């Protein structure tokens, strides 16, 4: 027979009946079903993250008080909830832990109590990073932990941007405040400069006054010398001037009074100079004038004081001589003409002393005026220095006083203000261990599916001989189930010994693998009993459906609604969940619920298979006599 004829004959056989056509089309659509369903389920899982439940725990107590109070935790929480990146659920810490334990949420994001304090710590003396807590549970879904890590990293970057903008705003505001304070300080410095000018003018006037005082003191010295000469002449003629003694005594008494007043005036001036010098120094010091400026002002005044001291010393010497003259005048006994002549000279000297004293008085007045001007200037210096002090103090207070280590810590905190503190209720360990429950569950189905290709699900001889549908069903179920369990034991050995996976509950995990094999065998048995070889094809379809709905990779919440519904119905998802709890040390109570669902599947499938065997023992159909379309 030629090749075209052979192809035509085969096509005629495959399309001989409507069921043949359906089977042929179905087989051709297997790649479409597998690829289409898988790609449909994973077309855009990231776009469905808004359906993934995540607990958000905001414990932030805020930073600052009053108008300066800031609660970054509230801002971040509002942004997350409004962003709708996940199904955020605001919970307390205890409720979040329970929800994660029960599988109601896939992970927890926690904003700690010191979140705001840490974010604003860069401007203080204890800069440190803020933390965002991430709590996962691989027993719920391994990839959910990876998704949570990526989500927290995005949150960290978002918070860093928020804090960076506010930090920059505060920095610019602080710079503006510093500029304003420095401007005030500059105004104060101008006032201080004006006052300093007046201080200099007053010092010049004081210098002129002290010069006049020095000139008066010189005149007083000359007069005192003449008085001394006259007094000597009076002494020489004292023995001859008896009649003029009274006049001389009166004259010398008068002179002595003038001299004493001049002496007191001169001494008061000299005594006042140290006090004035100290007062000026104290005043300038209290007004914040630096010591170098004070020293220059005092140095300008020191020559004046020295000149006044010298003049006073000469004046006191002259007054002393006048006093001696008065004492000697009392002893004058004679020499009237000489006494008269000496008295005249004494009178002349006394006039000169008076003139000098007057000049000294005028100079003292000028010194007082200069001191007054100096005091006025000092007052302005005081006002300006206060303004300067306050302005500079405000400016300095606006700039943190930090050491090198603190500045380094501040720079590090500003550059990376947020850290992630991750914890896990359970942990798979690595990517392979995270996917092991899914692939082990899938391998169990594939193993049972392959066994049913070579094992006859129902023995026709047993149906004819035993006449017991239950015994026939159990025999047809236990054979592939036990063989499949052997394969699952071998798989467990490979996982634990060869791959080195760690199991929190190894016996429980092995038990779930064997229970999965028994469950799958019951399901495929029922399919074969009722649909024959077509049941094998339906088993393949179920495998494809469970491949995408078991939640072995992405969280099942990312599935389209119809497939998400199947997740709660088909058994493989419960096998995956039970293995996760037992392998990673999760919630044993959930394992009990998963086992209950698997036992329901076993019971239902065996009951359905028994009904099919019962039908086979009571009657035969034309389908039983027709050859199988598959296999």
Image (tube, rainbow, N blue to C red):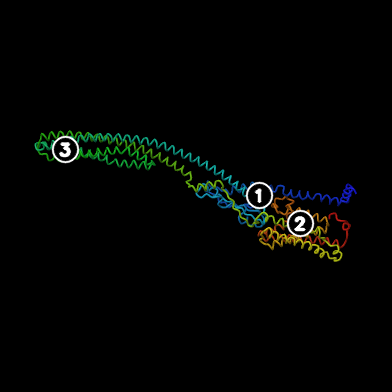
Q: Position of residue 411 (x, y in %)?
A: 53, 46
Which SS class for mark 1? loop
Query: Do we see residue 66 in this rendering?
Result: no
Would you name the residue on which mark 3 appears?
Answer: 252
Which SS class for mark 2? helix
Residue 396 in the image: above or below residue 528: above
Considering every residue shown, the one lying at the far bottom of the view is: 466
Would you name the residue on which mark 1 appears?
Answer: 86
Label 1 to label 2, Cα distance in Å?
Answer: 35 Å
Residue 547 located left or right of residue 472 = left
Residue 375 located left or right of residue 162 = left
Considering every residue shown, the one lying at the far right of the view is: 1
- Which badge, 1 or 2, comes first in the chain's sequence? 1
Q: Position of residue 48 (x, y in %)?
A: 69, 48
Dots 1, 2 in contact, CB < 8 A? no
Badge 1 density bin: few <14, some 14–19, many ≥20, Cα 10 Å: some
Instruction: Residue at 13% x, 40% y: name it.
Output: 330
The picture quadrant where one finds residue 630 is: bottom right
Query: Do we see residue 360 in this rendering?
Result: yes
- Which badge, 2 or 3, comes first in the chain's sequence? 3
- Tell us which disc is closer to us: 2 or 3: 2
Quick one: 470 or 15, which is closer to the camera? 15
Q: Which mark is residue 328?
A: none
Would you name the residue on which mark 2 appears?
Answer: 446
The picture quadrant where one finds residue 328 is: top left
Label 3 to label 1, Cα distance in Å?
Answer: 116 Å
């Amino acid at each position: 027979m030629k090749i075209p004829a052979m192809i035509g004959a085969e096509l005629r056989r495959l399309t001989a009946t409507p069921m043949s056509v359906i089977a042929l089309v179905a087989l051709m659509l297997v790649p479409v079903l597998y690829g289409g369903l898988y790609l449909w389920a994973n077309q855009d899982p990231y776009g469905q993250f808004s359906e993934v439940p995540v607990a958000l725990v905001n414990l932030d107590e805020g930073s600052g008080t009053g108008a300066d109070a800031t609660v970054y935790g509230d801002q971040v929480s509002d942004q997350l909830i409004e962003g709708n990146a996940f199904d955020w659920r605001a919970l307390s810490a205890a409720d979040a832990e329970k929800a994660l334990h029960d599988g109601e949420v896939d992970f927890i994001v926690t904003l700690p109590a010191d979140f705001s304090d840490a974010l604003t710590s860069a401007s203080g003396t204890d800069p440190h990073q803020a933390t965002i807590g991430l709590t996962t549970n691989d027993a719920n879904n391994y990839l959910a932990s990876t998704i949570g890590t990526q989500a927290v990293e995005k949150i960290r970057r978002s918070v860093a941007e928020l804090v960076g903008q506010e930090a920059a705003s505060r920095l610019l505001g602080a710079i503006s405040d510093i500029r304003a304070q420095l401007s005030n300080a500059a105004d104060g410095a101008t006032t201080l400069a004006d006052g300093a000018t007046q201080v200099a003018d007053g010092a010049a006037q004081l210098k002129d006054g002290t010069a006049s005082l020095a000139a008066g003191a010189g005149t007083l010295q000359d007069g005192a010398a003449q008085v001394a000469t006259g007094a000597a002449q009076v002494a020489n003629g004292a023995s001859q001037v008896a009649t003029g003694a009274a006049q001389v005594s009166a004259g010398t008494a008068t002179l002595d009074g003038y001299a004493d007043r001049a002496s007191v005036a001169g001494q008061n001036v000299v005594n006042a100079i140290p006090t004035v010098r100290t007062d000026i120094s104290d005043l300038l010091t209290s007004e914040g004038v630096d010591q170098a400026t004070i020293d220059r002002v005092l140095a300008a005044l020191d020559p004046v004081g020295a000149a006044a001291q010298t003049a006073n010393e000469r004046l006191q010497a002259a007054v002393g001589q006048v006093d001696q003259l008065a004492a000697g005048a009392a002893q004058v006994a004679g020499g009237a003409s000489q006494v008269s002549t000496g008295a005249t000279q004494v009178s002349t000297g006394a006039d000169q002393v008076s003139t000098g004293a007057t000049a000294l008085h005028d100079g003292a007045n000028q010194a007082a005026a200069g001191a007054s001007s100096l005091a006025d200037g000092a007052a302005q210096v005081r006002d300006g220095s206060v303004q300067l002090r306050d302005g500079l103090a405000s400016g300095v207070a606006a700039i943190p006083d930090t050491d090198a280590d603190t500045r380094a810590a501040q720079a590090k905190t500003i550059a990376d203000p947020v850290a992630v503190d991750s914890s896990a209720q359970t942990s798979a360990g690595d990517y392979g261990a995270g996917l092991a429950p899914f692939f082990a569950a899938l391998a169990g189905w594939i193993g049972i599916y392959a066994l049913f290709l070579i094992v006859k699900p129902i023995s026709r001889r047993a149906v004819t001989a035993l006449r017991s549908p239950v015994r026939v069903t159990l025999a047809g179920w236990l054979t592939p189930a036990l063989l499949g369990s052997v394969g699952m034991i071998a798989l467990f050995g490979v996982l634990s010994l060869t791959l080195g996976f760690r199991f929190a509950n190894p016996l429980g995990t092995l038990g779930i693998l064997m229970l999965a094999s028994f469950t799958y065998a019951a399901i495929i048995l029922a399919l074969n009993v009722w649909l024959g070889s077509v049941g094998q094809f339906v088993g393949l379809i179920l495998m494809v459906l469970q491949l995408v709905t078991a939640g072995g990779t992405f969280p099942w919440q990312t599935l389209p609604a119809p497939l998400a519904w199947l997740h709660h119905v088909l058994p493989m998802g419960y096998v995956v969940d039970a293995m996760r709890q037992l392998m990673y040390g999760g919630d044993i109570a959930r394992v009990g619920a998963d086992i209950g669902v698997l036992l329901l599947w076993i019971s239902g499938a065996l009951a359905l298979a028994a009904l099919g065997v019962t039908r086979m023992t009571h009657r035969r159909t034309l389908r039983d006599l027709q050859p199988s379309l598959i296999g």
